[in-house]
Image (tube, coloured by chain):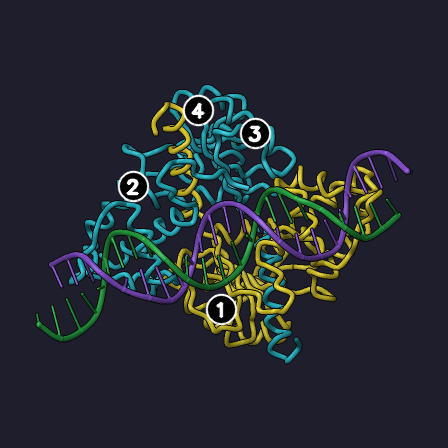
Chain colours: A yellow, B cyan, C purple, D green
Amino acid sequence: MARQNEGNPRTSDKTIGRLSLYRRLLNVLQGEGHRHVFSHQLAGIAGCTAAQVRRDLMAVGYSGSPIHGYEVVRLIESIREFLDAPGGQGVALVGVGNLGKAILAYFTGRRPNLRIVAAFDNDAHKVNRVIHGCHCHAMADLPQVVKKLGIRLAIITVPANAAQEVAEGLSRVGVRGLLNFAPVRLRVPPNVYVEDIDMTMSLEKVAYFARLAGAEKEGKP
Amino acid sequence: MARQNEGNPRTSDKTIGRLSLYRRLLNVLQGEGHRHVFSHQLAGIAGCTAAQVRRDLMAVGYSGSPIHGYEVVRLIESIREFLDAPGGQGVALVGVGNLGKAILAYFTGRRPNLRIVAAFDNDAHKVNRVIHGCHCHAMADLPQVVKKLGIRLAIITVPANAAQEVAEGLSRVGVRGLLNFAPVRLRVPPNVYVEDIDMTMSLEKVAYFARLAGAEKEGKP
DNA sequence: TAGATTGTTAATCGATTAACAATC
DNA sequence: TAGATTGTTAATCGATTAACAATC
């Protein structure tokens, strides 16, 4: 599915995801005026175990104290240093349909470090217009724009039958990470990381397990 | 994170997800006129191993043949019987913002068995209007509508600060499965299954691993 | 000091992969 | 029959959990 982290200290896919979650939770805590936080507090709001939080945080290289736990400000800063690229990374969005537009709106102003700096679509009605603060280019201009802006990340929100071609085009011009919403498995070079968000699969999982839970409740095996 | 399948035959979360994927791929194969398929063919397009496909398919209780592999039509039917609720399940969507509207459009006509039958929002401009073919109700009417339509599944696309309250309201009126797009961990009763789609976390993961891949390529440890 | 929490190692758990006899 | 593929069991792998000495 997704390419494994081949770096030496073996920081797993799941740990990276949780670090992103912890940071968001820490920002909320900071807003509420908390100076320090213990692993079990973070675990409580993140929905995992305290041991897991401690192990995850070891990866970022900032140690807590047995008395105060972790200093919120410094922990946020450490996670930032660990996760973020210095100077930020621009993101391209390909496919400005309903979903693409919603995602443009969603990410606008959310993480300044990961800003969608260019959108692409084939539809002449969208090309050269600004949508949720983002300029929409023609697909034909993708190579030039991506190269010019030094874009290395992209979000794919095109229909399923166009996704593979888009992924190949992006890989060719230097994009190294794809967030794919199209319901197909993308075949990309080994140096490109793909993360899939498959809404249909997720909803079907919910339907299955909700039904299972219902059946259990009514006393079935 | 998500509630474990506590049923006896131990059909894992991941297997259920892959079955959903296999079904979609099989539908494409069927459209292309394929009558039979081997585990390694399915594995090739699904991006996993043949052994994994065979093990997953054991769960649905339909056996293939060493000569022809699996019969596409019957396999689709077997997966359908295993995954789907007989008669279909209605889904509620709560929060008709940009993302909610995009999801309404996305699921319209996609899986007839999982149809969004009601949407809810607080905004008076949306209430009592039909959006992407779905009637939008006032939040205050949620309990009555959910009970009347017998809805057991819901998609949450409200802002983060409203999500917990919405989840509790849904749990109270009989909803047993939630697909949550709000970037918070929901606290729900143990008989409610929650699946999270966290777009910010996913994008941050892509950014991290893309950067890692780039660093490796340039010869760093 | 006593005590709760930390970093870190060992034990457990579950899922993936490999292997192989059974089968058509 | 010979051969590729199947269902199924055993081995491997990785992540989670439990345990515990070190620490402030």
Question: What's the CA distance linking mark 3 and mark 4?
Answer: 13 Å
The amino acid marked with disc number 1 is Met
Q: Residues within 10 Å of mark 1 (few under 14, many from 20)?
A: some
Of all residues, the one furthest to the bottom in this rendering is: B219
Can marks 4 and 2 be said to lie on one chain? yes
Residue for badge 3 = B166
Residue for badge 4 = B146
Q: Residues within 10 Å of mark 3 (few under 14, many from 20)?
A: some
Q: Residues within 10 Å of mark 4 (few under 14, many from 20)?
A: many
Give the image quarter of residue A9: bottom right
Pick the front one: B70 or A106: B70
Note whether residue A201 is visible: yes
- Where is residue B173? Give x, y as percent: 48, 22
Question: What's the CA distance linking mark 1 and mark 2?
Answer: 41 Å
- Nearer the observer: mark 3 or 1; the answer is 3
Can marks 1 and 2 be said to lie on one chain? no
Residue for badge 2 = B82
Can marks 3 and 1 be said to lie on one chain? no
Can marks 1 and 4 be said to lie on one chain? no
Question: Any mark on residue A172, and which?
Answer: none
The amino acid marked with disc number 2 is Phe
B99 relative position to A198: left or right: right
Q: Is residue A178 above or below residue B159?
A: below
Q: Is residue A36 above or below residue C17?
A: above
Among numbered discs 4 and 2, the one appearing first in the sequence: 2
Pick the front one: B93 or B204: B204
Question: What's the CA distance linking mark 3 and mark 2?
Answer: 30 Å
D4 relative position to B189: left or right: left
